Amino acid sequence: MRTSGVEYAIRDIMLRAKEYEKQGKELIYLNIGDPVKFGFRTPDHIKSALIEAVKNDNNYYAESEGILELRQAIVERERSKGFFTTEEDVLVTNGVSEGLDMVLASIVDSNSEVLMPGPYYPPYSSYTRFYGGNPVEFRIFPDGTPDIEDLISKITPRSIAICIISPNNPTGEVFDAKSLKKLIDVAAEHDLYFICDEIYDKIVFEESFTGIGKVASDVPVVLLNGFSKAYLMTGWRCGYICMNSSTEKLNELRENLPKLARVRISSNLPVQMAAVEALRGPQDHIRIMVEQLRRRRDFIVKRLNAIKGISCSVPRGAFYVFPKLDLAPRWNDDKSFVLDFLSKTGVISVYGSGFGKAYGSNHFRLVYLPAEEVLDKAMDRLEGFIASSL
């Protein structure tokens, strides 16, 4: 069955959490990157735009490609980051996940290979496998730069694309301009599509964000982005695909990708109208959110590094940490650790091998979206759990 290779560790872990919850015990959720669940509220001007759209009976099917005003606003946003695209090269999707599905459905054939930095976000590998392809991990150095020699060594005649996310999920690493240029050069040399997910582009801490458009040149870049994270619209499911307008190598995709948009009819119209307001309205909430997340990041990294058997690098973006574990001889693997941790403490984390076994094993992922008092309680439980296992 084609779905047998589909995995999503971030939500799969909830099957075990429900068993714990049935016992009437308290759970601490550190597994899903949903800021709205943790008190970050959708800005009022965005909510008002949605309500007004519904009240004004804008409740019909939208254009399959997305309403023109939103596509224009998306072009304005992405051009401000250096990505050259036009309204004709933008498709509005039901979240970034649908956009990724559409793109991989369009380019992946049986035995195609999609190169992705390890650890990677699980849907990249799951969609690749679903369409008959194979995900291939390449190495990232500890300083967050890609191992270009390792990447090149893994390119074969079956390689079809390089797929990255920056800032990264699960590590929070951010690719700088130099790293992006090296990756783009490899894609150009080997005639590969370059798929870049920038959903966390507004959530960076110590430095400015470099978008793929700054180095894209005429490489066939497909950019994915959306409104879930920075605009706190997770449950509204609104994202988009942009294609690099400066390359003819995307012409076949440019012609055929909209067919999938038409088959699924359209994205939610009132949400699209709210998304216009998100892009063109006040942006103050982003700065406030990033400041709160920076404090929570610093807090959890300090707590993790104080626990024996755990080491954690400092993420530069998004809202995840990806600590490394000293497993031996207490647990067989990182999944055993996460399940044991859940069953004994009620803290829900995600096993690192769910983000790719080559570079995710012996790690686990936590979100640091909750308030510091919740993070403090979770870290107390983790510290006690580790100590009791020595």
Image (tube, rainbow, N blue to C red):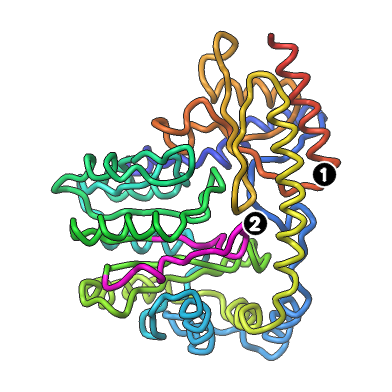
- Range covered by the magenta-colored residues: 196-218
Q: Residue at x 39, y 31 (%)?
A: 358
> Where is residue 159 shown, x and y percent of the image?
21, 49
Q: Is residue 82 above or below residue 161?
A: below
Residue 62 seen: no
Q: Residue at x 49, y 56 (%)?
A: 166
Q: Residue at x 57, y 60 (%)?
A: 200
The residue under label 1 is 372
Residue 88 part of the magenta segment: no
Residue 10 seen: yes
* Residue 4 shown left or right of residue 299 in the figure: left
Q: Choose top left, top right, bottom left or bottom right for residue 202.
A: bottom right
Give, as a three-letter code, the residue at label 2. Answer: Phe
Disc nearer the start of the sequence (2/1) = 2
* Residue 267 shown left or right of residue 255 in the figure: right
> Where is residue 345 shown, x and y percent of the image?
76, 25
Q: Give the quarter of the figure containing the C terminus.
A: top right
372 or 5, which lies in front? 372
Which secondary structure lies at badge 1?
Answer: helix
The residue under label 2 is 205
Q: How many marks?
A: 2
Give the label on residue 158, or none. Answer: none
Q: Is residue 275 above or below residue 34?
A: below
Q: Residue at x 55, y 37 (%)?
A: 12
Distance CA(mark 2)–CA(mark 1): 18 Å
78 or 340, which lies in front? 78
Q: Choose top left, top right, bottom left or bottom right for residue 49.
A: bottom right
> Where is residue 67 shown, x and y percent of the image?
50, 86
> Where is residue 349 shown, x and y percent of the image?
64, 34
